[in-house]
Image (cartoon, rainbow, N blue to C red):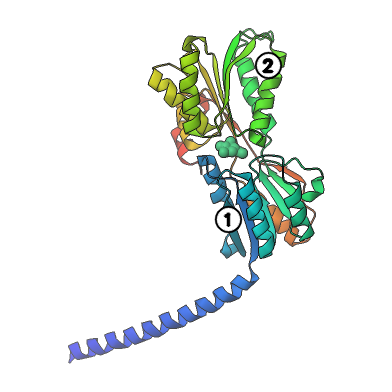
Amino acid sequence: MFRKKRVLSFILACIVLATFISCGASKKSEVTEEESSDLIVVGFSQPGAESAWRVALTDSVKEAFSESKGYKLIYKDGQSKQDNQIRDIRTFIQQGVDYIILSPIVETGWDTVLSEAKQAGIPVIICDRNVNVSNEALYTAFVGSDFKSQGEAAVSYLEKMYDSDGDGVTEDLNIVHIQGTLESSAQLGRSKALAKAMEEHNNWNIIAEDCGEFTKAKAREIMKNTLEEVDASDIDVLYCENDEEAMGAIAALNEAGVKYGVGSKITVVSFDATRNALELCMNGQINFVVECNPLQGPYLYNIVNMLNQGKTVPKITYVDENTFTPDELTEDYIQNRKY
Ligand code: AHR
């Protein structure tokens, strides 16, 4: 009798649960349909996925413009080609998106497609790197890094490090310079700061310079070739324009058995401050890292939100950035970073 009662109440419970689940499901799909028609559509064009840094930027933007916050984000990867990015922006225009976010691979060549977006009445927010256009009204706002300041921070570290008596005259320096994607804002800013320092210090020499495309593989190849042409004992500074390049160059130095970093002759300078590079910095393998902050999603969200409310937005927003030396880093700090 007792067993029969238990079976009956189990069946009843199953019926109640099934009804509850099916009601819940139909309610949920109604809400989703309703919501999706109200979503603000943002097209996001990235140049590629060449570095851990860029993946962090993509994640940050995706997180900021989530459906739960009322947005639908259409993400496009330009596969490291400007033509692809231009095609992606044209697709966004045809789709009638509400906003376009563009992280441009290089600075020039955007006038036509940005005019098309303007004619279609779609605000464009430039992010990460900047554009160099004939009329700044072609885009609504810029959110990203001040790359020249980043380069200046690296240069001023070198100036202090190699001027031990503080008289403004540094030691003679032989520099290996591995550049990022040529004509990108990140390369232009970081290279310009070094070029200016070269003018100011006539005892600084660039003994090797090549473009590493912001990738580990290319930088490793450049460093390997450099070590075949230059005596490693002549190198004082390795100026890499991002962490991937620093890691690639370091791999080549390791292979060749050349010492570098704190306590060695070769000082390594890098940009980005990704977790892997900060580990190397904490261990003394990279002397100085200039941060390039990829967590730009919240800044972009703020701009789009203001535009939604009809507010005037700042034309330029620079993201917060820092610099790092080995003594300032702890494992705890590194592991708690988002990228
Ligand atoms: O534009 C930012 C640069 O692009 C970052 O330094 C680099 O890692 C990325 O690929």
Q: Secondary structure at mark 1?
A: strand
Identify whether 34 is placed above or below 87: below
Task: Report the amino acid beneath label 2.
Answer: Met
Mark 2 neighbour density, 10 Å: few (under 14) some (14–19) many (20 or more): some
Task: Report the amino acid beneath label 1.
Answer: Tyr
Quarter holding ligand 1: top right
Q: Nearer the viewer, residue 208 or 43?
A: 208
Residue 163 in percent (x, y) is at 63, 10
- Quarter that holds the N terminus: bottom left
Distance from disc 2 to disc 1, alpha carbons, whole Å, reads: 40 Å
Residue 236 in percent (x, y) is at 54, 13
Q: Nearer the viewer, residue 242 or 138?
A: 138
Query: Left or right of 233: which side holds 311?
Result: right
Residue 293 in percent (x, y) is at 60, 40
Residue 198 is marked as 2
The residue pinned by badge 1 equals 75
Identify whether 286 is placed above or below 186: above
Q: State which tag comes first along the sequence, 2 or 1.
A: 1
Q: Secondary structure at mark 2?
A: helix
Residue 29 is marked as none
Identify whether 2 is placed above or below 153: below
Q: Nearer the viewer, residue 180 or 152?
A: 180
Whether residue 212 is visible: yes
Residue 278 in percent (x, y) is at 49, 32
Toward the front, the furthest residue is: 83
